[in-house]
Image (cartoon, rainbow, N blue to C red):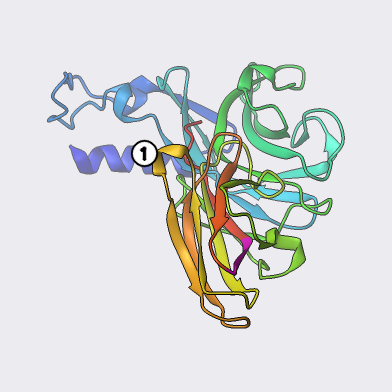
Amino acid sequence: MFVTLIKRLALALIMSSFTSHSFADFSSEEDLGDTGQSIEKPSWKFIRALNGFEPERLSKTKLALFPGVVAYRAAKELVASDKKLIINMASNGLNGLDTGQFSDGVGYYIYLLRNVKTKEIGAVASSAISMKKVTTPAGFNAIRKLPWGFVAIQGQIPPFHLSYWPKPFTRFTDAASSEKWSALDNGRSRVFSEIDLSRWIPDNARMAYILCVVDNTGEMPGNASIRVSGEQKDGLVVGSSAAKGQTSSLALHQRINSNRKFYYKVTGGATLSIYVLGYSNTEPS
């Protein structure tokens, strides 16, 4: 029966890009129940599906969404698309921005749409965090917010690579220890001070991928620490330096607050520079 189920799901992927399938089409007569042991009939709880629809950067203002299948209507219905959707950030409406202009420093999120009558599938990019606040074209409803987003950097979609979709880890392709990616330059605060990553990281991300570089002013040995909250007391030591020009570096995933901020401090003659390399979207969509 499991093989039969897989075949039926695969069939949905190769059907027309503008079709939808009811939950009943993927079910047999046997009830799953609360144990989850039977695979004869998948309960809607087990097909809160998102397979495919991962984004790919095509240009400074264009994204492609790969073919995919998504559950909606409380996961009672599956909607499939077998063609790429192209989103143009320079236009408004279906497969563009929902409203407004593409602006530097603004976070954008991708919403899948479905036409109530024609069953056409499309998408919009929106700065709205909530699906209820998305502006949709006439005849279309927003059916799913993808678990990903980005911030426009220097007026464009930043080059990126994704891993682990649909719980994506986004790496900035050209990120390096340069001014463009610098969140902190030779910080010397002796008390925990704020670092804001909102220039690079969207609202639905709670893990930042950062590079910490510790140097020294030459005064005395010292180290650098980071933390998310006061409960961590002295925080995590990310490097130390005993003399000027003696640097240490560490790339790590760092938990950040909902405002996309965390904190750092140094001791002795240490200084800390931080560069943003990527992020993980950990918030449910």
Q: Amino acid at mark 1?
A: Leu
Up the image or down, 194 lies above or below 139; here it is below
Q: Nearer the viewer, residue 71 or 225?
A: 225
Q: Position of residue 110 (x, y in %)?
A: 64, 36
Q: Quadrant of the N terminus?
A: top left
Q: Residue at x 33, y 28 (%)?
A: 26
Q: Residues within 10 Å of mark 1 (few under 14, many from 20)?
A: some
Q: Is residue 270 magenta?
A: yes
Q: Position of residue 155 (x, y in %)?
A: 84, 50
Residue in view at x 69 percent, y 18 percent: 133
Q: Where 100 sits versus 4, above or below?
A: above
Q: Which residue is mark 1?
A: 9
Residue 55 x %, y %: 61, 49
Q: Is residue 218 above or below residue 210?
A: below
219, 4: nearer the viewer: 219
Position of residue 42 measured from the top left corner of the image (x, y, whole percent): 26, 27
Q: Residue at x 53, y 57 (%)?
A: 209
Query: Which segment is the magenta one?
Result: 269-275
